[in-house]
Image (cartoon, rainbow, N blue to C red):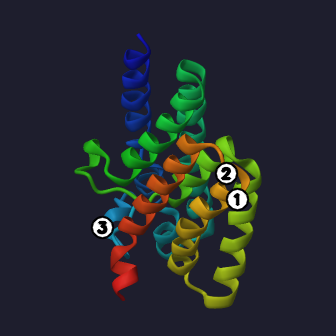
Amino acid sequence: MIYLRYAIIVVVAYLLGNISTGVIVSRLVAHKDIRSSGSGNAGATNMLRTYGWLPSVLTLAGDCLKAVIATLFGKLVGGEYGMLMGGVAVVVGHNWPVFYGFKGGKGIAASLGLILVTSPLIAVILAAEQVAVVALTRYMSVASILSALLYPVLTWVFYPHDLPRLVASLVVGALALFSHRANIAR
């Protein structure tokens, strides 16, 4: 029975991740698909560069909110393991949405939603790191890559005996690094 619950969590969370806030907002604002502009990414950074701060903030908030909902749904249906499964699945759905040809965002805002639910203090630390790194370097990708590396480290520091939480943080960090592979190569 618990495996059926976990399967439901993963499917529902993945499908929630498929809701592309960037695509929706760009179609409302400019009657275009954000993925055909700028970097081709459906995330908040490309929205900022292409359409400005308000569409970017709406995209960030929407992507974060869907992850919060998926993570809380996972916790409600499947407890702590379900929470982590829902959080990881929503990030996967955000990055590779089946309904958008597997072309989504890079998962940073969705990851923030997961981290807000599972580890609020870590979310605050990573948000502060993002602001500081962007202020210093002017590169969001550098801040995101650093967050992807820091998230598992901070999880290990704050939750040293919580193996499922550590594994989830490693997976989410790896997904973010994989999504930023072109930025890393540059």
- Residue 68 pos. (x, y %): 60, 39
Q: What's under tag 1, amino acid-wise? A: Val
Q: Looking at the image, tell me whether mark 1 or mark 3 is earlier in sequence order.
A: 3
Q: Residue at x 70, y 59 (%)?
A: 157
Q: Mark 1: few, some, or many residues within 10 Å (few <14, many ≥20)? A: few
Report the residue at 57% width, 71% height from top.
52
Please report contact status of discs 3 and 2: CB closer than 8 Å, yes or no: no
Q: Residue at x 30, y 67 (%)?
A: 36
Above or below 175: residue 164: above
Tell me where residue 3 sits by quadrant. Answer: top left
**What distance separates the C-alpha of mark 1 from that of mark 3?**
41 Å
Residue 4 or 60: which is nearer the viewer?
A: 4
Query: Marks 3/2: CA distance?
Result: 43 Å
Q: Which label was assigned to residue 36?
A: 3
Residue 174 placement (x, y as % from top left): 42, 61
Cα gap from disc 2 to disc 1, whole angstroms? 6 Å
- Is residue 82 or residue 14 the one in the foreground? 82
From the viewer's perspective, is residue 69 above or below residue 1? below
Q: Indicate the quadrant containing the C terminus: top left, top right, bottom left or bottom right.
A: bottom left
Which element is circle 3 on? helix
Which disc, if any, is residue 160? 2
The residue type indicated by label 3 comes to: Ser
Mark 2 and mark 1 residues within 8 Å of each other at the beta carbon:
yes
Q: Residues within 10 Å of mark 3 (few under 14, many from 20)?
A: few
Q: Mark 1 against mark 3, which lies toward the viewer?
A: 1
Rendered position, 180 above or below 22: below
Element at badge 1? helix
Q: According to the image, label 1 marks what residue? A: 157
Judged from this view, the residue extending furthest toward the left is 101
* Amino acid at circle 2: Pro
- Residue 130 lies, in percent from the top left, at 66, 72
